[in-house]
Amino acid sequence: MKVKFNRAALAEALGLVTTVVLSRTTKPILQGLKIQAQKDQVYISATDFEIGITCLIPQAQVEEKGLAVVPAERLAAIVRESVDEILAMEVAEATCRIKGNDSNFTIYGYQPEQYPEVPGFDGGAQIEADLIKLQEAVEHCLFATAKENTRYALSGILWEPVGKKLTLVGTDGRRLAKYKLNLNAEVDKKMEAEKFIVPAKAMALLDKVGAGEKDKVLIRFVDGKIILACGKVVISSNLVEGTFPKYEDIIPADYKNKVQLNTAATLSAVKRAALITNEDSKGVKLALGKKSLVFTSRAPEMGDAEIAMEVDYKGEPMEIGFNPQFLVDVLRVIREDSFELQLGQPDRPGLIKSGANFVYIVMPVSLS
């Protein structure tokens, strides 16, 4: 195999595909990247058996077709530190040589036939969406998924496609984020009423794919996997097995205490109040009155904080406590200038609505 790469284009592709590569594994070949040079195109792939990714590398000139598997860490480091605009790669019998104007590297790879198969996108799309809009939907739910939980189903995002809508839901049991996405076309009729749990790691990978305003993403579910094709990139992932909670049952529909809040001002207030909290006193109290919303916190041997905001509120005065990080996380992803906060009793979850598509539920904490 002989290929000349534009170094910047190669570096961008490596930055994406190497996120899948395992740093520790009993199968050393999984620490490699598969490079396939065809007549006039070069693809680079990685997999950890759970998630796979294939990326078309632009601005690559194929001089001799071939297939190679090279160590990801070494290749990425060489490309990253190179100062050349063009890098030439030659591979023969698992030996890879990378040449620049004043450099010549030799790294030893693996036998390509031993590398696991990385699924491609074969067949028609069952779901089609704008890539930017799907990434926005993912960002609104990903932070709420469980990082460590014995309930494996909570480590992914629920997908519910119906008609021209896709509902995404993420939860860790203490908070829940739900986003409704408008699709470009009706979903495949066979998929309606189906539910899929997509691993958070795969969703985070999709969020890293560069997207333009006109870029689309095509999606298929096949053999217990999700496969997403977005421009030059194809991502595949095993689906999460398990039962997702009946989230609709926990979204309050009877709250009367509602207030419209400025997103940036509320984020600033919560972050400042959180400065006087610790592991033993990890809560911020919200005191809502006719004209003000006051955020307070107190931690033994640290001190206390009070931040006040002017609001237009017509409900009954009330107080409720929340983990400030759970508020910061959601306020960071809200893109509108304002959002609606709805509250019930102090022992019931808070509800945040942003626009027509996003709902967030967060459980309160006791501050007594």
Image (cartoon, rainbow, N blue to C red):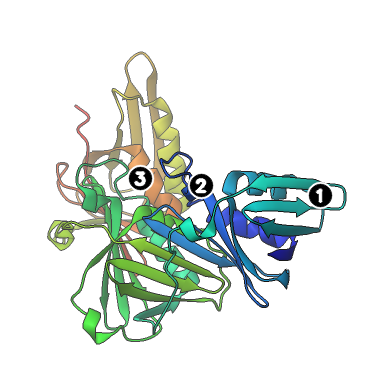
Instruction: Give the residue displayed 56% in from the left and 66% down from the top.
Output: 55
Residue at the spot x=35%, y=45% of the render? 327
Instruction: List the residue tagged with mark 3.
Output: 327
Question: Badge 1: how crowded within 10 Å, few (<14), some, or many (20+)?
Answer: some
Task: Please name whichever residue, 198 or 70, is drawn nearer the observer in this view of the structure.
Answer: 70
Confirm whether residue 48 shows in the render.
yes
Q: Which mark is residue 31?
A: 2
* Type of amino acid at the residue the image marks with label 3: Leu
Q: In the rendered view, tell whether residue 268 sits above or below residue 126.
A: above
Q: Is residue 344 rendered to the left or right of residue 284?
A: left
Residue 149 appears left or right of 294: left
Q: Secondary structure at mark 3?
A: helix
* Quadrant assignment for the N terminus: bottom right
Q: Quadrant of the C terminus?
A: top left
The numbered mark at residue 83 is: 1
Residue 360 visible (yes or no): no
- Where residue 190 appears, x then y in whole percent? 22, 83
Q: Is residue 273 above or below residue 331?
A: above
Instruction: Please provide percent x and percent y for residue 95.
Output: 66, 51
Q: CA distance from mark 3 to mark 2?
A: 38 Å
**Cα–Cα gap, marks 1 and 2:** 25 Å
**Label 1 vs 2, first from the N-terminus:** 2
Of the two numbered discs 3 and 2 on the same chain, state the one appearing first in sequence.
Answer: 2
Residue 67 disc label? none
At label 2, which amino acid type do we have? Gln
At mark 1, the secondary structure is loop
Q: Which quadrant of the structure image shows residue 252? A: bottom left
Q: Nearer the viewer, mark 3 or mark 2?
A: 2
Which amino acid, mark 1? Val
Secondary structure at badge 2 equals helix
Quadrant in the rendering for residue 36: bottom right
Percent x, y for residue 208? Answer: 52, 58
